[in-house]
Image (cartoon, rainbow, N blue to C red):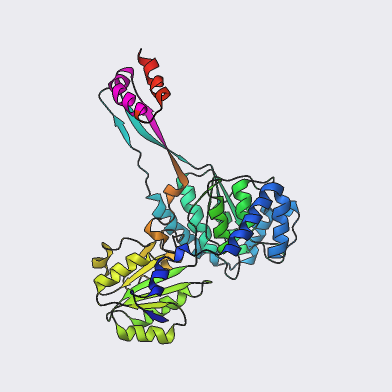
Amino acid sequence: MKIISTAGKTWQQLCARQLTRKRRVEDRVRVIIEDVRLHGDEAVLRYTRRFDRVRLKPKQVRVTETETSAAFQHIDPNLSVHLKAAIQNVQAFYSKARVKPTRLVHDDGVMLADKFDPLNRVGIYIPGGTASLVSTVYMTVIPARQAGVKEIVLTTPPRPNGGIDPNILVVASLLRVDEIYKLGGAQAIAAMALGTKLVRKVDKVVGPGNAYVAEAKRQLFGFVDVDTIAGPSEIAIIANHHSNPQYVVADLLGETEHAGGLGFLITTSKSLAALAKKQIPGGYCLIVRNLEEAVEAANQLAPEHLEIMVKSPRKLLKRIRAAGAIFLGPYSPVTVGDYIAGPSHVLPTGGSARTFSGLGVEDFIRKTHIIAYTKSALEKVREPIERLTALEGLPRHYDAVKVRLE
């Protein structure tokens, strides 16, 4: 672990890490998206052969009920018990989520309100690679279900044998996912966002992925809504001499299991910094003078996960302004948030926690404003509308009011 200072260039680069993009990735993703737009399933299957090295026929792309049923025969028999415990916790958390509409009724008959409707069709991307991200299935599907989304589509890269990890299929089955496709990478995001004959267009794409998946989401935003443009997973820990050094080291090392995972230690303890430098091969350690400086540094960093591992963590909580999720005390490691606590582990990365939030029910609901005026109410606002439309040089806007009152 490298010891750095807030006065150095490295710290400035870390705080602006979400701005780093690779031109090669951007260009390759742009080509893939345009190819899928022009050639649909033909392009999607071609990139599946190229990148996943799996040759699929069109009828093999969508997972069948037979394949899903067979998956239950290839998992640990005890897994479903543990899965149900995690699923229940997530469902319990999101069952309490409420999106409250606004409704105002004035004496003159004006009614102003918001109308909330769930998205009709949502696409969820589950990465393949070295890890089987079973937890991401329930951490994304459940908030969408609680919001009332009618159709949930899941895509995940095929294995070399042309199948999908049975654990993912089992969780998807337990959560009643409507459609599952053996597609990965930027081509899967493009298929969901643009629509093909095999994969109908969705309203929103959520879920983590590699640099190509993240770039595809960025480029396709507008054709479809997205959650966040996710980067590598990351953890920051505020610690001092009260912190258990074994807990700190274990949590920082845990993040390196993710490809490109980033670990940050913000501490007032030089001995803890020295230990981290010795035992942790990557990441960064910032030595600060006091906990006030530690909090300010954490806010500048805006990490995906923030652990506050000091004697009275709740005293610092109210001053934290930017973090995807906050874990308080020595017995709240990021691991519990990743798997079983309840709130979704799909969180903003790369410093985007300054403006973005973790995945929730509200991400799957669209809001519509409702405005209703009476004739007398319209008469009362006639003059300001006339002045404002004249100011903006849009007289026909005022004519739409005038014709109703004369």
Of residues 248 and 282, the one drawn nearer to the viewer in this rendering: 282
Q: Residue at x 29, y 26 (%)?
A: 384
Number of numbered discs visible in the structure rendering: 0
In the rendered image, residue 108, in percent from the top left (x then y), is placed at 27, 22
101 displayed left or right of 232? left
Is residue 254 something that shows in the picture? yes
Residue 377 drawn in magenta:
yes
Tell me: residue 168, above or below residue 267. Answer: above
Q: In this view, does 186 lie to the left or right of 18?
A: right
232 or 124, which is in the foreground? 232
Q: Give the range drawn in magenta.
A: 368-390
Q: Which of 399 and 369 is in front in this view?
A: 399
Q: Is residue 198 visible?
A: no
In which quadrant of the rendered image does the N terminus lie? Answer: bottom left
Answer above or below: position of 288 versus 159: below
User: Observer-nearest residue: 220 or 337?
Assistant: 220
Using the image, determine if residue 77 lies above or below residue 272. Answer: above
Residue 178 vs 102, above or below: the answer is: below
Q: Residue furthest top?
A: 406
In terms of image quadrants, where is residue 308? bottom left
The magenta stretch spans residue 19: no
Q: In which quarter of the image is the C terminus?
A: top left
Position in image of residue 14 (x %, y %): 42, 70
Image coordinates of residue 385 in percent, x first then y, are 33, 26
Determine whether, in the image, residue 256 is placed left or right of residue 159. Answer: left
Predominant SS of the magenta segment? helix
